[in-house]
């Protein structure tokens, strides 16, 4: 057999094999084809592409798919502008939906001017690293360490440390993505509906004497808030005031008025955390000495 004939046979074989594979692929494409609604791409383009997970899905594309099948409403995206959510609703011919905005809340007010640091920490400047070394140096075991892991983890520039090392959440920028909740080694952050104005800015479970020796704004479990609030709204558990948010009467600020330390506050839309008239005034403007 000449080399030409060999080449001709090889070319014929390869051509036949290519044709066979093309037929197989065409058949497989027809049998395995999954239709995807073209509206998914259009809706996806109208979403913010932050992939924060605040809507309850892994990202914007899965959220767009759920919008198309009707299992969610546009309003569940709290990152998107209201105008864009309305545009999505109009495009799909559905209601925008009304979901209450959630924000990250910090259960601690123990900045360096009111909470004692009992030990110096030297090492990697992260809360998680510091927490591994005898809890991080703060006198209060439950206190915010103030090294800013939450600030670094926030992709929306919604958290900044003040001059006393205490995280401040910008409610307008917060998307309730939950990154700060996951990264805080003291579990001080939680996601709360903005309507929850009554807030205990403390997580200490120490008894009153120990707690107040370490922090000026700790909950000392005096029980005045529980006595003044509507029945059952606040209870004292393990030396800490606990608000039952399932109760209907959350509109009254009376529970904060006699709190002697100001650990329980009212989160005002304009003025931020507001303490009661009975709270001692904090006038210190510099960090406490280590001791």
Image (cartoon, grey):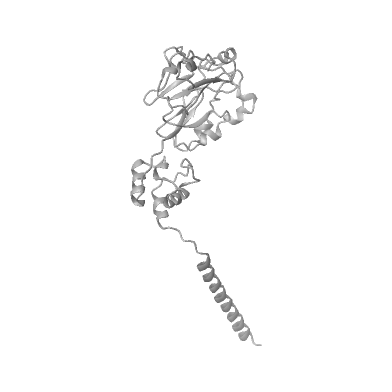
User: In the rendered image, is residue 143 in sight?
Assistant: yes
What residue lies at 59% left-to-right and 15% top-to-bottom? Answer: 207
Residue 136: quarter of image: top right
Residue 252: quarter of image: top left
Quadrant (top left/top right/bottom left/bottom right) for the C terminus: top right
What residue lies at 40% left-to-right and 55% top-to-bottom? Answer: 39
138 vs 35, left or right, is: right
Quadrant (top left/top right/bottom left/bottom right) for the N terminus: bottom right
Residue placed furthest toward the bottom: 1
In this rendering, the count of numbered labels is: 0
Residue 37 place in picture, x, y as percent: 43, 58
User: In the rendered image, is residue 110 in sight?
Assistant: no
Is 291 situated above or below 197? Answer: above
Residue 169 place in picture, x, y as percent: 45, 29
What residue lies at 55% left-to-right and 34% top-to-bottom? Answer: 183
Residue 257 place in picture, x, y as percent: 43, 15
Asked whether 52 or 253 is in front, the reply is 253
277 vs 241, left or right, is: left
Residue placed furthest toward the front: 231
129 vs 216, left or right, is: right
Residue 28 place in picture, x, y as percent: 54, 68
Residue placed furthest toward the right: 1
Asked whether 25 or 221 is in front, the reply is 221
């Amino acid at each position: 057999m000449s080399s030409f004939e060999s080449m001709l046979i090889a070319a014929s074989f390869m051509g036949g094999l290519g044709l066979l594979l093309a037929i197989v692929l065409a058949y497989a494409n027809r049998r395995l084809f999954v239709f995807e609604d073209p509206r998914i791409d259009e809706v996806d383009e109208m979403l913010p592409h932050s992939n924060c997970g605040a809507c309850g899905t892994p990202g914007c594309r899965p959220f767009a798919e759920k919008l198309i099948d009707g299992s969610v409403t546009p309003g569940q995206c709290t990152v998107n502008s209201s105008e864009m959510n309305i545009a999505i609703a109009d495009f799909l011919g559905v209601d925008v939906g009304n979901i209450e905005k959630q924000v990250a809340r910090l259960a601690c007010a123990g900045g360096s001017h009111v909470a004692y640091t009992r030990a110096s920490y030297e090492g990697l400047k992260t809360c998680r690293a510091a927490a591994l070394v005898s809890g991080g140096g703060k006198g209060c075991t439950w206190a915010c360490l103030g090294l800013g892991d939450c600030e670094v983890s926030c992709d929306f520039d919604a958290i900044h440390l003040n001059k006393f090392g205490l995280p401040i959440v910008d409610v307008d920028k917060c998307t309730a993505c939950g990154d700060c909740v996951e990264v805080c080694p003291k579990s001080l952050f939680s996601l709360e509906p903005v309507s929850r104005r009554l807030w205990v800015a403390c997580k200490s479970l120490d008894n009153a004497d120990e707690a107040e020796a370490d922090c000026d704004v700790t909950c000392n479990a005096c029980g005045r808030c529980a006595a003044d609030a509507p029945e059952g709204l606040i209870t004292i558990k393990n030396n800490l005031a606990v608000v039952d948010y399932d109760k209907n009467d959350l509109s009254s600020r009376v529970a904060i008025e006699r709190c002697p330390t100001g650990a329980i506050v009212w989160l005002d839309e304009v003025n931020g955390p507001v303490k009661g008239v009975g709270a001692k005034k904090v006038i210190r403007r510099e960090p406490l000495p280590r001791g």
